[in-house]
Amino acid sequence: MRPHNNYDFTQLGQASESQQAVVLRKAYALLGISFLPCAAGAYAGASVNFYSLFSNSWLSVVAFLIFAYGLSFAIEKNRYNNVGIALLMVFTFGIGFFVSPLLQFALASPIGSQIVGMAAMMTAGVFLTMATIAHHSKSDMNGIGQFLFVGAVVLIIGMILNMFLQIPALSLTISAGFVIFSSLMIMWQIRTVIAGGEDSATSAALTLFISLYNIFTSLVHILLAIMDDR
């Protein structure tokens, strides 16, 4: 969820175009492969009541945060070797496992499959749109990077507040914010690779996967609130 490099986009033409293309191609390949362990994790999670593994839902949230941020840190530390790729696959499996309760809740609705399908198609559409913009844009992305940093802080604060307040309107606002934030993150990350500011395909794939996860789950929340009559 984080823009981690401060790259001068005015030096766009100075980096090696062939190297950028290789990094981006590998990032896309890793991103595609990462959905396989993610699907396996979701399937494994379907047979387990995740929240029953802990005494309360708060511990479940803490477990998720420790897993997600801890493994993200480990992936970044190994971003240039095969250990990082292996950890990325473990990460995506775990994310699939953790998202399983949301999918089970959504699919329990009479229109659950429609909601999940719509969220998936909309997520794919957002990715293709932002990737296309990133490939054709010539604008300076440094300003967007700063905006994303501020946006991440605001969203995290909003999530923490809503864990205590449990306000439906605030929850939907946060979900909408994540859709916007993660969409811009996709464009920023791809543009950063193209500009030569990111030379690790593993790190780029991690950011893109997290962004897609945020968009998909946020859209599921929004569509459930709008379409589900339960």
Image (tube, helix red, strand yellow):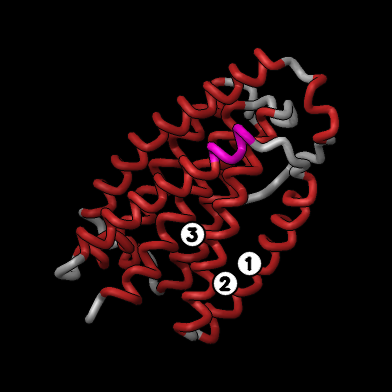
**Which element type, helix, strand or loop, lies under badge 2?**
helix
Q: Mark 1 and mark 2 in contact (Cβ < 8 Å)?
A: yes
Judge whether 22 appears above or below 141 on screen.
above
Q: What's the CA distance linking mark 3 and mark 1? A: 17 Å
The magenta segment is: 131-136
Amino acid under label 3? Ala
The reply to whether the magenta stretch includes residue 200 is: no
Amino acid under label 2? Met
Nearer to us of marks 2 and 3 is: 2
The residue shown at (47%, 72%) is 58
**Which element type, helix, strand or loop, lies under badge 1?**
helix
Q: Position of residue 213 (x, y in %)?
A: 45, 51
The residue shown at (26%, 47%) is 44
Give the numbered dot on residue 159. 2
The answer to which of marks 3 and 1 sits earlier in the sequence is 3
Give the numbered dot on residue 156. 1
Q: What's the CA distance linking mark 2 and mark 1? A: 5 Å
Mark 3 burial class by Cα count in 10 Å: few <14, some 14-19, many 20+: few
Would you name the residue on which mark 3 appears? Answer: 63
Q: Considering the image in quadrants, where does the C terminus appear?
A: bottom left
Of 70 and 129, the residue lying toward us: 129
